[in-house]
Amino acid sequence: MLKILVVEDDTNTRKLMCAILKRNGYKTFGAEDGIAALNLMAKQHIDLVVLDLMMPNMDGYELTRQLRLSWENLPILMVTAKQEPNDKKQGFLVGTDDYMTKPVDEEEMVLRIKALLRRAQIASDHKLSVGRVVLDYDVLTVSRDKKVMTLPQKEFYLLFKLLSYPNMIFTRLQLMDEIWGMESETDDHTLNVHINRLRDRFREWPEFEIVTVRGLGYKAVKKA
């Protein structure tokens, strides 16, 4: 399930937006300002951020700048009551992917989010291409030319997550929470076994490799 973070200082608005997104099949998290959002993202993988512009402690412009430093390809939707062209221009300059003005049309917001996720390669058809390699989320297959390999579920989810964000470092805790769930008793050994199996399976494939970042976690690197 894709995870969306809603950053909004108004409690009622934040709860409403989360409820709308939940009804549309997303798992949601809420934060009251930019600082709380960054703290949450240090512990929890997020697929897309919806953020307000005018917030205490850290406004939407600065939050977007901070997000871009660590999550270059993270889809960001800025939602604000400010309607001046210069406000929108500034939003795009700091790195937002899309911009909506309040009051927000619920259906339009959901459509924009789906479009952003599509552009981020976490598409509704759940297919991801890396060179000549295609991952099909619905059937858990990895194919290259005429060779098709069906992976065990956890291995596939792990590979799909890493390749969806090439060069992005995921901590071991992030991956275990994302793939096995926060309530799971999965430990480092289980994750290491799955990583090593993936490396063995695709060792001869030139398109990508899974790299260990010592002391941090893992990342997928495109090679071709």
Image (cartoon, grey):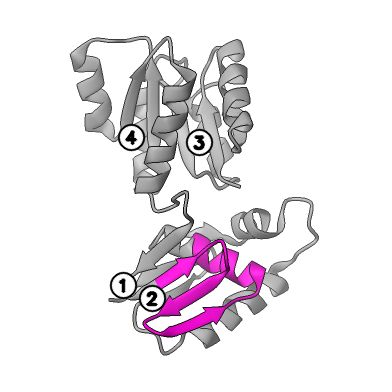
- Label 1: which residue? 131
Q: Secondary structure at mark 4?
A: helix
State yes or no: discs 1 and 2 in contact (Cβ < 8 Å). Answer: yes
Closer-to-camera residue (66/84): 84
Q: Secondary structure at mark 1?
A: loop
Closer to us: mark 1 or mark 3? 1
Q: Position of residue 180 (x, y in %)?
A: 70, 59
For the residue carrying disc 4, how many other residues have a C-alpha within 10 Å: few (<14), some (14-19), or many (20+)? some
Circle 3 sits on which residue?
A: 38
Q: Identify the mark nearer the N-term, 2 or 4.
A: 4
- SS for callout 2: strand
Count of numbered tags? 4
- Farthest residue to the bottom: give it: 204
Residue at the image position 34 percent from the left and 42 percent from the top? 68
Question: Which one is earlier in the sequence, the residue at label 1 or at label 2?
Answer: 1
Residue 117 lies left or right of residue 195; in this view the side is left
Whether residue 110 is visible to the viewer of this picture, yes or no, is yes
**Mark 3–mark 4 CB contact (< 8 Å):** no
Residue at 47 percent of width and 15 percent of height:
56
